[in-house]
Image (spheres, helix red, strand yellow):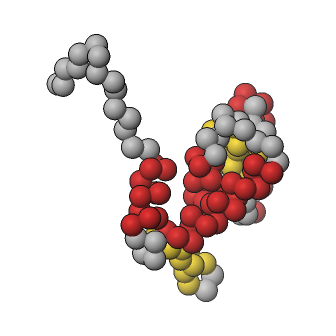
Amino acid sequence: MNSTSQTDKPTKSPTILDFFLQHEAQTPESIFLKQPTKNGWDQYTWREAGKESRKILASMQKLGLRKGDRVAILSQNCAAWVMCDIAIMMGGFISVPLYANVNATTMQDILNHSEARLLFAGKLHPQDWENQ
């Protein structure tokens, strides 16, 4: 156990966003993410994912979102979800995940409780709509 004196300032632990930005800067052309598709795979480099995330961030800022605002994401697990989440972190917003398999009542409760100001909705499978 490390002991600290009262004059020591706590150190900030790196965040997921810190790691993303570090890899984007150091290895921009390396593959960050692969997404299975009907025809194979789509892939994104660290640079491409950063560029897409910043586009999403700019759109959220144009809508007037401010640091601390909550942003919900309703989608299957996919590359778009990851890039939306990165954009949310970049803006200092709070991510509210909504998994596609929750029922409509639970989804409404989460949205009401979180006070999300924006909802990203991705593609859902037909069986997910049956739960709604």
Q: Is residue 126 left or right of residue 2?
A: right
The quarter of the picture where residue 54 lies is: bottom right
Total numbered labels placed on residues in the image: 0
Viewer-proximal residue, 124 or 15? 15
Residue farthest to the bottom, as pictured? 39
Q: Camera-side residue: 36 or 44?
A: 44
Which one is nearer the viewer's eye here, 26 or 94? 26
Residue 19 appearing in the image = yes
Name the spot of residue 64 as percent of width and height, x first. Answer: 80, 43
**On screen, residue 119 above or below 111:** below
Residue 12: image location, x then y, percent: 38, 35
Q: Is residue 90 above or below residue 115?
A: below
Judge whether residue 97 can be spotted in this image: no
Q: Is 126 in front, or is 19?
A: 19
Q: Residue at x 62, y 53 (%)?
A: 87
Q: Residue furthest top?
A: 6
Q: What percent of the width, then of the height, locates residue 36?
A: 56, 75
User: Percent position (x, y) of residue 119?
Assistant: 76, 47
Q: Residue at x 59, y 49 (%)?
A: 90
Please identify the residue farthest to the right as the structure is shown. Answer: 63
Residue 88 lies, with reference to residue 68, above or below; the image says below
Q: Residue at x 23, y 16 (%)?
A: 5
Q: Residue at x 28, y 13 (%)?
A: 6
Classify the position of the N terminus by image quarter: top left
In the image, taking residue 22 as reference, residue 78 lies left or right, namely right
Horizontally, is 27 left or right of 7 in the view? right
